[in-house]
Amino acid sequence: MSLDTIVDSPPDVDASISTDGAPAWFPTADLASAAAALYARETVPEVAGRFADASLFSAAGLSPSARKAVDLGFVPVYTESIAVEGPRWRIEVGPGIVAVRSTDPTRRDRTLERQREDRAKRLDEMVDRMKAGEPEPEPAPTAGIRAWSRKSRSRMVERLAQLDYAPMFVLGGRLAMVTLTYPGEWLSVAPDSATCHKHLLALRRRFERRYDRPMVVVWKREFQRRGAPHYHLMMCPPAGDFRAWLSKAWASIVNHADPTQRARHALAGTGVDYAEGARYRDPKRAAVYFSKHGAFSAKEYQNEAPEEWGDGSVGRFWGLWHLDKAVAAVEVAPDVARTVLRTLRRYSDANGYQISVDRWRKVTTVDRETGEIGFRWRKRRTRVWVRRLRGTAGYLVVNDGPVLASSLARYAAQSTSVRVCRSRAGLGPVGYLP
């Protein structure tokens, strides 16, 4: 089966269905659960009939999808009952993400045991110091947050692709990009990060009192070239006089002491852009486009705290209100996980893109007078392909996670051979047909 067949084949999950008020192009938690359940169905009812004692396959401690399979009389492919020691592989499906991950319970237990031993050792050392009258040593300083790191950007994209956006659309409305800025003389009203965050929380409280509904928002903080912070909010504004109310409420919250600054701030301190919100047509676009505000190298200053705020930590750069993850996970056999991961990697490479990077190359030089051979380094700007999923596990952000996951489930069932697992109880081979 070719990769084109996987992508173009009709999904098992109807992505056109819309529930809980969410648009059809934002898959809901039910679609993610239905797609993940396809992997739990890769079992054979006849295998369960070979064993008289059905209690050997107890559903205790299993994932929801595997527990459902046990209740129906199916033997899960790779669960607590029949797994050998080693990594446990699982497929995770979200509205805009498909992930292959693994955990090793034995290794995790060993790590927890070492941590308990370390805590007991530190406690004994503290008791000995107290008995000897020695002072408590100063804790090691921790690095404060001063910029929006690449790791934090990656976590943000991953989390936005995992969210259930149904609460954002439950009361109707269109997506918009709401912008909150500070006056020209901003340092007196925003002297530090904590004050700015209090302003944002105050706006949330006023919104919920005014409209009698939760403020469902994804927010991100950036900094202008002049150093002033500003916020971007992805939300569905209520109909009516929201623009006028927002301008008045935000100016009142910031409350600049100078009447001129406050009047100007009330006129130009906020923005509601529905054209920008129209770009967020699915979970992938919402995650990627929203995170790109200030993510380009030309605007890297937007991700760094101003010098006026000192050297301390400036806190988080993004957050969520009233939004939860909608990720369904199911344990699978190792060969199923490898098949899905390799297919995801090929799919990512086929839909990849290029970026410009600086490459240094060692160039040989010859002195014309002495004939001495040397070398120098030359920097060259070139374009390279972005490669995803290079390791043994990972995730891929996609436009519709349930559709791709359901296609991958069918492909894995048709491309893998009969799998065999042995239980720790010595029950012999336990497997299922493709």
Image: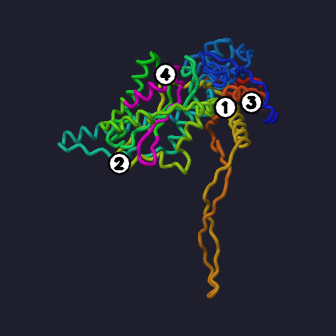
Residue at disc 4, secondary structure? loop
| Residue 271, position as x, y percentages in the image | 50, 33
Say which label, 4 or 2, has the lower sequence index: 4
Q: Viewer-nearest of labels 1 and 4?
A: 4
Which residue is denoted by mark 3 in the rendering?
412
Amino acid type assigned to the residue bearing label 2 in the image:
Glu
| Circle 3 crowding by C-alpha within 10 Å: few under 14, some 14–19, many from 20 | many
Quarter-of-image position of residue 288: top right
Which numbered disc covers residue 308? 2
Q: Viewer-nearest of labels 3 and 4?
A: 4
Confirm whether residue 165 shows in the render.
Answer: yes
Query: Rounded to the nearest whole Å, what is the CA distance between mark 3 and mark 4?
Result: 52 Å
| Circle 1 crowding by C-alpha within 10 Å: few under 14, some 14–19, many from 20 | many
Which residue is denoted by mark 4 in the rendering?
241
Say which label, 1 or 4, has the lower sequence index: 4
Give the extent of the magenta segment: 222-251
Which residue is denoted by mark 1 in the rendering?
399
